[in-house]
Image: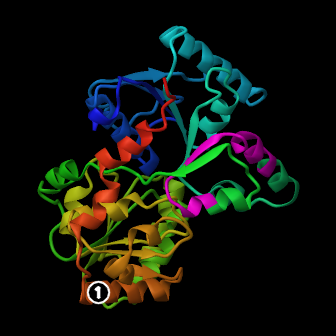
Amino acid sequence: MSESIARPLTVVLLIDGLPGGGAEKVVLTLAAAMARAGHAVTLLSLRAVCEYPVPPGVRYLLVEDRERGPLRRVGEIGRRARALDAALAATFGDAPIDLAISNLPKTDRIVAASKRLKRAWMCLHCALEVGSLAGRSGLKRWIKHRQLLRTYSGRRLITVSAALQDDVRALGIAPARMVTIYNPFEFEAIRAQAAEACPIEGDFVLHVGRFNHQKRHDRLLEAFAQSRFGGRLVLLGSGGAAEVAPVRAQVEALGLADRVVFAGFQANPYPYMRAARALVLSSDYEGFGNVLVEALACGTPVVSTDCPSGPDEILTGPLATGLAELTPEALAAAIDRVLAAPPPIDPAALERFGVDHVTRQYLALAEPT
Protein backbone atom coordinates (compact mmCIF):
# COMPACT_ATOMS: atom_id res chain seq x y z
CA MET A 1 0.00 0.00 0.00
CA SER A 2 2.74 2.47 0.93
CA GLU A 3 4.45 1.96 -2.46
CA SER A 4 1.64 3.90 -4.16
CA ILE A 5 2.43 7.02 -2.11
CA ALA A 6 5.71 8.74 -2.96
CA ARG A 7 6.20 10.42 0.42
CA PRO A 8 5.00 10.18 4.00
CA LEU A 9 1.87 12.24 4.50
CA THR A 10 0.65 14.28 7.43
CA VAL A 11 -2.92 13.12 8.05
CA VAL A 12 -5.48 14.40 10.56
CA LEU A 13 -8.67 12.43 11.17
CA LEU A 14 -11.23 14.42 13.14
CA ILE A 15 -14.25 13.04 14.97
CA ASP A 16 -16.67 14.01 17.73
CA GLY A 17 -15.49 11.42 20.25
CA LEU A 18 -14.96 7.67 20.08
CA PRO A 19 -17.90 5.88 21.68
CA GLY A 20 -18.81 2.43 20.40
CA GLY A 21 -20.15 2.88 16.87
CA GLY A 22 -19.63 2.24 13.18
CA ALA A 23 -18.17 5.60 12.13
CA GLU A 24 -15.74 5.46 15.03
CA LYS A 25 -14.50 2.00 13.99
CA VAL A 26 -14.04 3.23 10.42
CA VAL A 27 -11.86 6.12 11.58
CA LEU A 28 -9.75 3.89 13.83
CA THR A 29 -9.29 1.31 11.06
CA LEU A 30 -8.13 4.01 8.64
CA ALA A 31 -5.82 5.55 11.23
CA ALA A 32 -4.17 2.20 11.93
CA ALA A 33 -3.72 1.36 8.24
CA MET A 34 -2.28 4.77 7.38
CA ALA A 35 0.14 4.62 10.32
CA ARG A 36 1.32 1.14 9.29
CA ALA A 37 1.99 2.52 5.81
CA GLY A 38 4.42 5.06 7.29
CA HIS A 39 2.25 8.18 7.38
CA ALA A 40 2.09 10.59 10.32
CA VAL A 41 -1.47 10.19 11.57
CA THR A 42 -3.19 12.31 14.22
CA LEU A 43 -6.56 11.23 15.55
CA LEU A 44 -8.23 14.41 16.80
CA SER A 45 -11.22 13.92 19.09
CA LEU A 46 -13.59 16.68 20.18
CA ARG A 47 -14.91 14.79 23.23
CA ALA A 48 -13.18 12.90 26.03
CA VAL A 49 -14.89 9.60 25.32
CA CYS A 50 -12.91 6.70 23.89
CA GLU A 51 -14.26 3.16 24.10
CA TYR A 52 -11.69 1.78 21.66
CA PRO A 53 -7.89 1.56 21.98
CA VAL A 54 -5.97 4.10 19.92
CA PRO A 55 -3.93 2.17 17.29
CA PRO A 56 -0.15 1.95 17.68
CA GLY A 57 1.72 4.74 15.93
CA VAL A 58 -1.27 7.09 15.93
CA ARG A 59 -1.14 10.34 17.89
CA TYR A 60 -4.29 11.04 19.89
CA LEU A 61 -5.14 14.73 20.32
CA LEU A 62 -8.11 15.80 22.45
CA VAL A 63 -9.59 19.24 21.79
CA GLU A 64 -12.46 19.36 24.24
CA ASP A 65 -14.82 22.27 24.79
CA ARG A 66 -14.47 23.28 28.43
CA GLU A 67 -17.25 25.86 28.42
CA ARG A 68 -19.91 24.72 30.91
CA GLY A 69 -21.97 27.85 31.48
CA PRO A 70 -25.68 28.22 30.75
CA LEU A 71 -24.87 30.14 27.55
CA ARG A 72 -22.35 27.64 26.22
CA ARG A 73 -24.46 27.03 23.09
CA VAL A 74 -24.16 30.71 22.14
CA GLY A 75 -21.33 30.99 19.67
CA GLU A 76 -20.33 27.38 20.31
CA ILE A 77 -19.28 26.48 16.77
CA GLY A 78 -17.09 29.53 16.30
CA ARG A 79 -15.54 29.12 19.75
CA ARG A 80 -14.75 25.48 19.15
CA ALA A 81 -13.37 26.19 15.66
CA ARG A 82 -10.96 28.73 17.17
CA ALA A 83 -9.90 26.17 19.78
CA LEU A 84 -9.38 23.62 17.02
CA ASP A 85 -7.23 26.02 15.01
CA ALA A 86 -5.18 26.86 18.10
CA ALA A 87 -4.60 23.16 18.81
CA LEU A 88 -3.55 22.54 15.21
CA ALA A 89 -1.15 25.50 15.34
CA ALA A 90 0.37 24.23 18.57
CA THR A 91 0.75 20.73 17.15
CA PHE A 92 1.83 21.40 13.56
CA GLY A 93 2.98 24.99 13.52
CA ASP A 94 3.07 26.23 9.94
CA ALA A 95 3.73 22.76 8.51
CA PRO A 96 1.13 21.68 5.97
CA ILE A 97 -1.51 19.07 6.65
CA ASP A 98 -1.67 16.90 3.55
CA LEU A 99 -5.01 15.27 4.28
CA ALA A 100 -7.68 16.24 6.82
CA ILE A 101 -10.89 14.24 7.07
CA SER A 102 -13.81 15.28 9.25
CA ASN A 103 -16.34 12.72 10.46
CA LEU A 104 -19.89 13.15 11.82
CA PRO A 105 -22.13 16.24 11.58
CA LYS A 106 -21.07 18.15 14.71
CA THR A 107 -17.42 17.81 13.75
CA ASP A 108 -18.24 18.89 10.20
CA ARG A 109 -19.85 22.10 11.44
CA ILE A 110 -16.80 22.96 13.53
CA VAL A 111 -14.40 22.12 10.71
CA ALA A 112 -16.47 24.24 8.30
CA ALA A 113 -15.84 27.23 10.60
CA SER A 114 -12.10 26.48 10.90
CA LYS A 115 -9.62 28.80 9.20
CA ARG A 116 -6.90 26.11 9.08
CA LEU A 117 -8.98 23.36 7.46
CA LYS A 118 -10.51 25.09 4.45
CA ARG A 119 -9.62 22.13 2.20
CA ALA A 120 -10.61 19.35 4.57
CA TRP A 121 -12.73 16.48 3.32
CA MET A 122 -15.97 15.70 5.14
CA CYS A 123 -17.04 12.08 5.31
CA LEU A 124 -20.80 11.47 5.40
CA HIS A 125 -21.57 8.24 7.24
CA CYS A 126 -25.35 8.66 7.14
CA ALA A 127 -28.00 10.26 4.95
CA LEU A 128 -28.47 13.91 5.88
CA GLU A 129 -32.20 13.81 5.17
CA VAL A 130 -32.99 11.10 7.72
CA GLY A 131 -30.10 11.80 10.06
CA SER A 132 -30.54 15.56 10.40
CA LEU A 133 -33.94 16.58 9.03
CA ALA A 134 -36.25 13.70 10.02
CA GLY A 135 -38.86 14.76 12.55
CA ARG A 136 -38.36 18.47 11.85
CA SER A 137 -40.96 20.64 10.16
CA GLY A 138 -41.67 24.28 9.48
CA LEU A 139 -39.15 26.81 10.72
CA LYS A 140 -37.02 24.23 12.55
CA ARG A 141 -36.58 22.21 9.39
CA TRP A 142 -35.79 25.35 7.36
CA ILE A 143 -33.13 26.43 9.87
CA LYS A 144 -31.52 22.97 9.94
CA HIS A 145 -31.58 22.76 6.15
CA ARG A 146 -29.83 26.13 5.90
CA GLN A 147 -27.25 24.86 8.38
CA LEU A 148 -26.58 21.84 6.19
CA LEU A 149 -26.21 24.04 3.12
CA ARG A 150 -23.71 26.28 4.94
CA THR A 151 -21.73 23.31 6.22
CA TYR A 152 -21.47 21.19 3.08
CA SER A 153 -21.92 23.40 0.00
CA GLY A 154 -18.63 24.16 -1.68
CA ARG A 155 -16.85 21.52 0.40
CA ARG A 156 -15.15 18.27 -0.57
CA LEU A 157 -17.31 15.33 0.45
CA ILE A 158 -16.80 11.60 0.86
CA THR A 159 -19.87 9.37 1.01
CA VAL A 160 -19.61 5.82 2.34
CA SER A 161 -22.17 4.56 -0.18
CA ALA A 162 -23.15 5.71 -3.65
CA ALA A 163 -26.76 6.26 -2.61
CA LEU A 164 -25.68 8.97 -0.17
CA GLN A 165 -24.62 11.12 -3.12
CA ASP A 166 -28.25 11.22 -4.25
CA ASP A 167 -29.24 12.35 -0.75
CA VAL A 168 -26.73 15.21 -0.88
CA ARG A 169 -27.97 16.42 -4.25
CA ALA A 170 -31.63 16.11 -3.27
CA LEU A 171 -31.05 18.63 -0.49
CA GLY A 172 -29.65 21.17 -2.94
CA ILE A 173 -26.08 20.87 -1.61
CA ALA A 174 -23.50 21.65 -4.29
CA PRO A 175 -20.15 20.23 -3.14
CA ALA A 176 -16.88 21.30 -4.70
CA ARG A 177 -16.12 17.61 -5.19
CA MET A 178 -17.78 14.38 -4.10
CA VAL A 179 -16.49 10.81 -4.13
CA THR A 180 -17.78 7.51 -2.77
CA ILE A 181 -15.39 5.35 -0.77
CA TYR A 182 -16.73 2.27 0.98
CA ASN A 183 -15.81 1.60 4.59
CA PRO A 184 -12.59 -0.35 5.27
CA PHE A 185 -12.33 -3.72 7.00
CA GLU A 186 -9.38 -5.64 8.42
CA PHE A 187 -10.54 -9.07 7.32
CA GLU A 188 -7.59 -11.01 8.74
CA ALA A 189 -8.06 -9.35 12.13
CA ILE A 190 -11.82 -9.91 12.06
CA ARG A 191 -11.39 -13.62 11.34
CA ALA A 192 -8.70 -13.99 13.99
CA GLN A 193 -10.91 -12.36 16.63
CA ALA A 194 -13.89 -14.42 15.44
CA ALA A 195 -11.98 -17.59 16.31
CA GLU A 196 -12.29 -16.84 20.04
CA ALA A 197 -14.90 -18.78 22.01
CA CYS A 198 -18.45 -17.46 21.80
CA PRO A 199 -20.17 -17.02 25.20
CA ILE A 200 -23.54 -18.00 23.69
CA GLU A 201 -24.26 -21.63 22.91
CA GLY A 202 -26.98 -23.16 20.77
CA ASP A 203 -28.87 -21.81 17.78
CA PHE A 204 -29.31 -18.05 17.64
CA VAL A 205 -29.65 -15.15 15.24
CA LEU A 206 -27.86 -11.91 16.04
CA HIS A 207 -28.42 -8.18 15.94
CA VAL A 208 -25.52 -5.78 16.50
CA GLY A 209 -26.23 -2.08 16.98
CA ARG A 210 -26.95 0.68 19.43
CA PHE A 211 -30.34 0.87 21.04
CA ASN A 212 -31.88 3.79 19.21
CA HIS A 213 -34.90 4.37 16.98
CA GLN A 214 -32.90 4.10 13.75
CA LYS A 215 -32.09 0.44 14.44
CA ARG A 216 -35.78 -0.44 14.88
CA HIS A 217 -35.53 -3.15 17.53
CA ASP A 218 -39.33 -3.12 17.55
CA ARG A 219 -39.43 -4.30 13.93
CA LEU A 220 -36.72 -6.87 14.68
CA LEU A 221 -38.64 -8.37 17.60
CA GLU A 222 -41.88 -8.58 15.65
CA ALA A 223 -40.09 -10.25 12.74
CA PHE A 224 -38.33 -12.67 15.06
CA ALA A 225 -41.64 -13.60 16.67
CA GLN A 226 -43.26 -14.15 13.26
CA SER A 227 -40.40 -16.20 11.81
CA ARG A 228 -40.26 -19.99 11.89
CA PHE A 229 -36.87 -19.93 13.64
CA GLY A 230 -37.07 -21.65 17.03
CA GLY A 231 -33.75 -20.54 18.53
CA ARG A 232 -32.79 -17.37 20.34
CA LEU A 233 -32.22 -13.76 19.36
CA VAL A 234 -29.05 -12.17 20.77
CA LEU A 235 -28.86 -8.37 20.96
CA LEU A 236 -25.41 -6.77 21.11
CA GLY A 237 -25.14 -3.04 21.64
CA SER A 238 -25.08 -0.17 24.08
CA GLY A 239 -27.94 2.04 25.15
CA GLY A 240 -29.31 4.00 28.06
CA ALA A 241 -32.22 2.92 30.20
CA ALA A 242 -34.65 5.05 28.22
CA GLU A 243 -33.70 3.28 24.99
CA VAL A 244 -33.48 -0.26 26.36
CA ALA A 245 -36.61 -0.25 28.55
CA PRO A 246 -39.14 -0.20 25.66
CA VAL A 247 -37.31 -3.08 23.99
CA ARG A 248 -37.43 -5.14 27.17
CA ALA A 249 -41.12 -4.32 27.56
CA GLN A 250 -41.83 -5.49 24.01
CA VAL A 251 -39.91 -8.71 24.64
CA GLU A 252 -42.21 -9.40 27.61
CA ALA A 253 -45.34 -8.45 25.67
CA LEU A 254 -44.44 -10.84 22.85
CA GLY A 255 -43.71 -13.68 25.28
CA LEU A 256 -40.07 -13.86 24.22
CA ALA A 257 -38.37 -13.39 27.60
CA ASP A 258 -36.75 -16.84 27.47
CA ARG A 259 -35.61 -16.44 23.85
CA VAL A 260 -34.06 -12.94 23.71
CA VAL A 261 -30.61 -12.29 25.20
CA PHE A 262 -29.44 -8.75 26.00
CA ALA A 263 -25.67 -9.19 25.76
CA GLY A 264 -24.66 -5.51 25.97
CA PHE A 265 -21.80 -3.81 24.15
CA GLN A 266 -19.00 -6.18 23.17
CA ALA A 267 -15.60 -4.85 22.14
CA ASN A 268 -15.19 -8.08 20.16
CA PRO A 269 -18.53 -9.01 18.58
CA TYR A 270 -16.99 -11.35 16.02
CA PRO A 271 -17.25 -14.65 17.94
CA TYR A 272 -20.98 -13.95 18.17
CA MET A 273 -21.12 -13.25 14.45
CA ARG A 274 -19.24 -16.45 13.60
CA ALA A 275 -21.46 -18.59 15.82
CA ALA A 276 -24.79 -17.05 14.75
CA ARG A 277 -27.02 -18.75 12.20
CA ALA A 278 -27.53 -15.31 10.65
CA LEU A 279 -27.05 -11.64 11.40
CA VAL A 280 -30.20 -9.53 11.07
CA LEU A 281 -30.22 -5.76 10.46
CA SER A 282 -33.62 -4.12 10.92
CA SER A 283 -32.79 -0.42 10.48
CA ASP A 284 -34.88 2.35 8.95
CA TYR A 285 -31.69 3.78 7.46
CA GLU A 286 -27.96 3.21 7.35
CA GLY A 287 -25.12 5.08 5.76
CA PHE A 288 -23.42 1.81 4.88
CA GLY A 289 -24.06 -1.12 7.23
CA ASN A 290 -20.69 -2.21 8.63
CA VAL A 291 -22.06 -5.21 10.50
CA LEU A 292 -23.22 -6.76 7.23
CA VAL A 293 -19.68 -6.90 5.84
CA GLU A 294 -18.27 -8.04 9.20
CA ALA A 295 -20.72 -10.92 9.46
CA LEU A 296 -20.04 -11.99 5.88
CA ALA A 297 -16.32 -11.93 6.64
CA CYS A 298 -17.06 -14.35 9.50
CA GLY A 299 -18.83 -16.66 7.05
CA THR A 300 -22.29 -15.86 8.42
CA PRO A 301 -25.27 -15.11 6.14
CA VAL A 302 -27.07 -11.83 6.65
CA VAL A 303 -30.61 -10.49 6.50
CA SER A 304 -31.27 -6.77 6.18
CA THR A 305 -34.00 -4.28 5.54
CA ASP A 306 -33.47 -2.75 2.13
CA CYS A 307 -33.17 0.69 3.68
CA PRO A 308 -32.28 3.74 1.55
CA SER A 309 -28.49 3.47 1.48
CA GLY A 310 -25.88 0.83 2.07
CA PRO A 311 -27.33 -2.69 2.28
CA ASP A 312 -28.21 -3.13 -1.40
CA GLU A 313 -24.66 -2.09 -2.35
CA ILE A 314 -23.28 -4.81 -0.07
CA LEU A 315 -25.82 -7.58 -0.63
CA THR A 316 -25.46 -8.10 -4.36
CA GLY A 317 -25.76 -11.25 -6.46
CA PRO A 318 -26.93 -14.29 -4.46
CA LEU A 319 -26.62 -12.31 -1.21
CA ALA A 320 -29.54 -10.10 -2.30
CA THR A 321 -31.89 -12.86 -1.17
CA GLY A 322 -31.34 -11.47 2.33
CA LEU A 323 -32.85 -8.07 1.50
CA ALA A 324 -36.34 -7.30 2.79
CA GLU A 325 -38.85 -4.48 2.63
CA LEU A 326 -39.15 -2.37 5.77
CA THR A 327 -41.93 -4.38 7.42
CA PRO A 328 -41.84 -7.08 10.13
CA GLU A 329 -43.57 -9.50 7.77
CA ALA A 330 -40.99 -9.04 5.01
CA LEU A 331 -38.10 -9.24 7.47
CA ALA A 332 -39.52 -12.46 8.99
CA ALA A 333 -39.84 -13.98 5.51
CA ALA A 334 -36.23 -13.02 4.72
CA ILE A 335 -35.02 -14.64 7.96
CA ASP A 336 -36.82 -17.85 7.04
CA ARG A 337 -35.55 -17.68 3.46
CA VAL A 338 -31.89 -17.21 4.40
CA LEU A 339 -31.92 -19.80 7.18
CA ALA A 340 -33.55 -22.37 4.89
CA ALA A 341 -31.06 -21.81 2.05
CA PRO A 342 -28.04 -19.71 3.09
CA PRO A 343 -26.61 -17.98 0.01
CA PRO A 344 -22.95 -18.68 -0.83
CA ILE A 345 -20.47 -16.08 0.41
CA ASP A 346 -17.71 -15.36 -2.10
CA PRO A 347 -14.65 -13.89 -0.30
CA ALA A 348 -13.60 -12.22 -3.56
CA ALA A 349 -16.80 -10.16 -3.51
CA LEU A 350 -15.64 -8.60 -0.23
CA GLU A 351 -12.28 -7.43 -1.55
CA ARG A 352 -13.67 -4.01 -2.50
CA PHE A 353 -14.12 -3.41 1.25
CA GLY A 354 -10.61 -4.54 2.20
CA VAL A 355 -8.61 -2.08 4.27
CA ASP A 356 -5.63 -1.77 1.91
CA HIS A 357 -7.82 -1.08 -1.12
CA VAL A 358 -9.95 1.48 0.73
CA THR A 359 -7.00 3.20 2.40
CA ARG A 360 -5.32 3.73 -0.96
CA GLN A 361 -8.46 5.50 -2.13
CA TYR A 362 -8.36 7.80 0.91
CA LEU A 363 -4.65 8.58 0.57
CA ALA A 364 -5.19 9.48 -3.10
CA LEU A 365 -7.24 12.45 -1.85
CA ALA A 366 -4.16 14.09 -0.30
CA GLU A 367 -2.99 17.47 -1.57
CA PRO A 368 -0.43 17.11 -4.38
CA THR A 369 3.06 18.37 -3.67
Left/right placement of residue 76 relative to residue 21 reads right
Picture quarter with the N terminus: top left
Magenta segment: 145-165
Query: Residue sitting at 53 percent across and 72 percent down?
Result: 307
Q: Quadrant of the rendered structure where residue 347 is? A: bottom left
* Quarter-of-image position of residue 276: bottom left
Residue 155 point in image, percent of width and height: 66, 39
Q: Does 255 appear above or below 139?
A: below
Looking at the picture, does residue 117 appear above or below residue 132?
A: above
At 84% from the left and 53% from the top, the residue drawn is 142
Residue 164: say if magenta.
Answer: yes
User: Does 231 sit above or below residue 287?
Assistant: below
Q: Amino acid at mark 1?
A: Phe
Name the residue carrying label 1.
229
The image quadrant that residue 364 belongs to is top left
Q: Nearer the viewer, residue 144 or 70?
A: 144
Q: Position of residue 165 (x, y in %)?
A: 61, 58
